[in-house]
Image (cartoon, grey):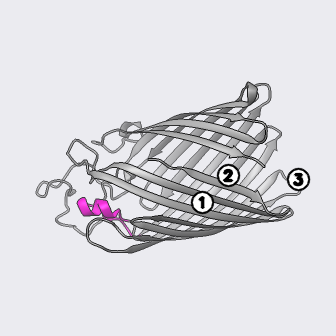
Amino acid sequence: MKSPALYLLAPISESWVFEIGAVYDNITGASPYYHTVLSGASGEGVEDKRAAGDITITKYFGRTAISARAAYSTEDDYKSVAGGLTLRHATPDQNTTFTLGAGYSSDRISPADGPAFTRTKTTVDGIVGITQVLSKNDTAQVNFYYAQQRGYLTDPYKALFGVDQRPDKRDQMAALIRWNHYFEGLKASLRTSYRFYHDDWEINAHTGTIEWAQELPYGFTLTPSVRYTSQSAAFFYYDPVYDAALGPPFPPGYVNNPNGFYTSDQRLSAFGGITPGIKVAKSFVGGWSVDAKAEYYEQRADWRVGGDGSPGLQDFKAQLYQVGVSKKF
C-alpha cells in the first residue's frame, strides 16, 4: 500500500483558519475469501485506489472556536461524503478546554465484482471531551465518543465468495484517556494513552500506547513507541470449523439458518496485537522539518488479554513506513 498525503493549515485573518488535506491510496495484494487458515482460501489479487480530501474552516471568538469540516472520498466501489462541526471553549486561564463535536457521513457501496448492486450506509457520531493543564509539565485529556451506523454493513466481497451477513445497525462507544509529562532534566516527553471501545456487536477492545519523545542535539528528536491492542470477537463471528454437510466456507448450522448473521472477517475475531515503532524528526532553520517513521505490527490470537483468542487463524504481520516534510510560514 502506498499513500501519499498533503496537508496545509493557513491563517486567513486574525480570527479565521483554513485547513485542507488530500490523500491518495494505492493498494495491491491478496484478499482472503474467508478465514486466513491453511485451507486454500487465499483469495485473488486485489488492486484498489482511493482519493480523498477534506476542508476545515475554524472561526475564533476569543476563547471559543467553532470548526466546520467537509470531506469526500472515492474509490471504484465506494464513495463517501461527510461533514461535521466542532466547538471548543477554554477557561479564562487557558488551563481547561472543553470540546463538543458532531458529524455525519453518507456512503455508497457498489461492488466491482459479482452481481451489480448499490447499497448505502450512514454514520452519525459525536464527541465530548476535556483537556486539562495539570502543571507546567503535565497535561491530561479525556474524550468520550459515540457513533451510530445504519445501512449496509456487510463486506460485499466476502459475501460473494464466502459467508458474510452482518446486522444493518451498529452502535459504537469509546473512551480515551491521555496523559503527557515533560521531563525537564532529560529534555524528553512521555506520552501515554488508553482507549476502551465497546459496540453492540459485542466487541470489547482495549488499546494502550506509550511514546517517549527524546530531544537530541542539532535539532533531532527520537521517538520510540509501543502500542498494544486486545479485542473480543463479534457475536456472529465463526471460527474456521465448517458445516459437516456443506463444508467450507459455511459455518455449522448454516443449512438451518441461512438468513442468520455470520462473518469470517479476521478483523472481527478475538485477538491481541503489538505495534513497536520508531520515529526520527529533524528541524531546520526557516521552519522546515522532516521526519521518518517505521512501525511493525503483529497480531496473534493467543496475545489477547482476558480470554482465549479466536482459534485456527494465521498470525497477521505488517510493516509500515512513513516519511514527512513540513514547512511553517
Magenta-colored stretch includes residue 37: no
Q: Nearer the viewer, residue 28 or 310?
A: 28
Query: x, y (%) of residue 205?
Result: 48, 49
Which residue carries the number 2 mark?
142
Q: Nearer the viewer, residue 83 or 14?
A: 14
* Horizontal relation, residue 303 to residue 67: left or right: left
Find the distance from the CA under tag 3 to the CA under tag 2: 19 Å
Chief SS of the magenta region: loop
Magenta-colored stretch includes residue 162: yes
Q: Which mark is residue 315?
A: none
Query: x, y (%) of residue 99?
Result: 72, 60
Question: Residue 22 falls in which quadrant of the image?
Answer: bottom right
Find the distance from the CA under tag 3 to the CA under tag 1: 27 Å
**Residue at horizontal 59%, vertical 44%?**
194
Q: Is the Cβ of the residue at disc 3 closer than 8 Å to that at disc 1?
A: no
What's the magenta region? 154-168
Residue farthest to the left?
Answer: 245
**Residue at horizontal 67%, vertical 52%?**
142
Q: Badge 1: how crowded within 10 Å, few (<14), some, or many (20+)?
A: some
Query: x, y (%) of residue 89?
Result: 79, 61
Residue farthest to the right?
Answer: 92
Q: Nearer the viewer, residue 255 or 71?
A: 71
Going from N to C along the chain, the mark reached first, 3 or 2, is: 3
Observer able to see residue 73: yes
Q: Which mark is residue 145?
A: 1
Query: x, y (%) of residue 8?
Result: 68, 55
Tag 1 secondary structure: strand
Type of amino acid at the residue the image marks with label 1: Tyr
Type of amino acid at the residue the image marks with label 2: Val
Which residue carries the number 3 mark?
93
